[in-house]
Image (cartoon, grey):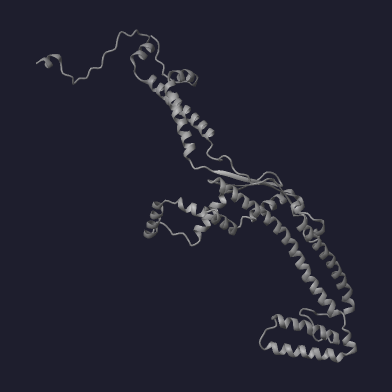
Amino acid sequence: MSTITEPTFHPVEAFGLITKYRRLILTGTTLMTALFIAAAYTLPKKYKSHFTLTINTLYFQNPLIRDFIPEVSDYSEMRSQRESLIRQALTPEFLGTLGVKYRIYSARKTLTPGLISHLKSLGIRFGFYQASKEGSGVAAAREDLLSHIQILNLDNTTFSVSFMYSDPDVALRATQDIYAQVIQTLLVAHTNNLVNVRDAIRKRLESLSFSLVSSSPDPRASIRPQVVSDELADIRNQIRALSIQYTEDHPVIKALRDRERILARWQGTSSIRPAGQVNDVSGEQVLPVIKDIYGDLMKKMNYLNIALEADHAHQGDYFATIDTPSYPESPLWPKKWLLALWGCALGFGGSLSIAAMLEYFHRTALHASSLAEQLGIPLLGVVPNVPWNLPLKSESRN
């Protein structure tokens, strides 16, 4: 008599299992594949439109203005600045305009079922739910809109910007608006840097020109000193009259004070000095230094004007558009072939697992044929299963 071994199932028996339960596996795989294909046609579609933009190194390097704006040569820093410039274009105002223009905000509102909003109102009434703050709905809508925009760093200089939406027309037009906004932001940011430096130099030149005028004596001071004295007295009378109504920080009083200092210096007095000045330096010593600084700044001012003219004339040299926004011909999601492949794999794997479980429980059950095979005893017959509550033949005849 052979010993009884515990029935098990081995993975090597998978082929025989497929053959035995082929109908179950075929049915399960077909049904699951059909279900996933039907889902591919019913799920909401997402279309994606994108553009690829390269920001050249010339945008960060200009030999004419390297004395004012340091050139960026580190690639990682330039990559961070490029990405930051692109993200700066996605301002809350622009996102709000985009959401209203294409009715993305209103489409988002319609997605909220009436039952959910009613439950929220009940929760607020009974204190189970806290009401959102004013303006949080707009902020949430902007965040939702921003999630549709994706910025990918392809390399140190090239970026891919895409917009995803359920309507292909809206996806294309929104991507075109984002492209125009990014280009405009790049140009405005570059021009503003130059303009800010030019304005700072211009203010410094105005201050130096005032110093030059105050350091150079007026011919009237030596030819007609009484004219200078009369003007100085008139200026002081105006200051006294205005001081009753205004403070020393008023622009008119400041201008009169500056004129008073110039006239006093021309007249040869040193009683009035600028605030914070301890030692009075003679005009003969200050004038050459001021002239040198003034001439150097004028030269740099000319360089900045040339850079601004070149900035307007050669704006296309700062960036290059590799891929323009194009119409999405097919949805990015769902992919029919991908869902069909997933359904086929899931249906086949699930059916095979069910078949393996059926085979395992079949082998572990107490079947007469299995016991005869395990014990090595011939099977003479199987006792039929007769219910105990059936009436006997004799009782049925009576």
Compared with 19, 201 (above or below) is below
**Foreground: 93 or 196?**
93
Q: Percent position (x, y) of residue 12?
A: 50, 19
Looking at the image, which residue sits at the far left?
398
Q: Percent position (x, y) of residue 93?
A: 59, 59
Q: Percent position (x, y) of residue 124?
A: 40, 59
**Foreground: 77 or 233?**
233
Q: Percent position (x, y) of residue 313?
A: 77, 57
**Foreground: 16 or 299?**
299
| Quadrant of residue 230 within the rendered picture | bottom right
- Identify the image quadrant of the N terminus: top left
| Quadrant of residue 296 within the rendered picture | bottom right
Identify the residue at image location x=47%, y=37%: 39
Q: Is residue 254 left or right of residue 90?
A: right
Q: Report how many numbered discs are placed on residues in the image.
A: 0
Compared with 330, 217 (above or below) is below
Q: Is residue 172 left or right of residue 360?
A: right
Identify the residue at image location x=87%, y=72%: 291
- Identify the image quadrant of the C terminus: top left
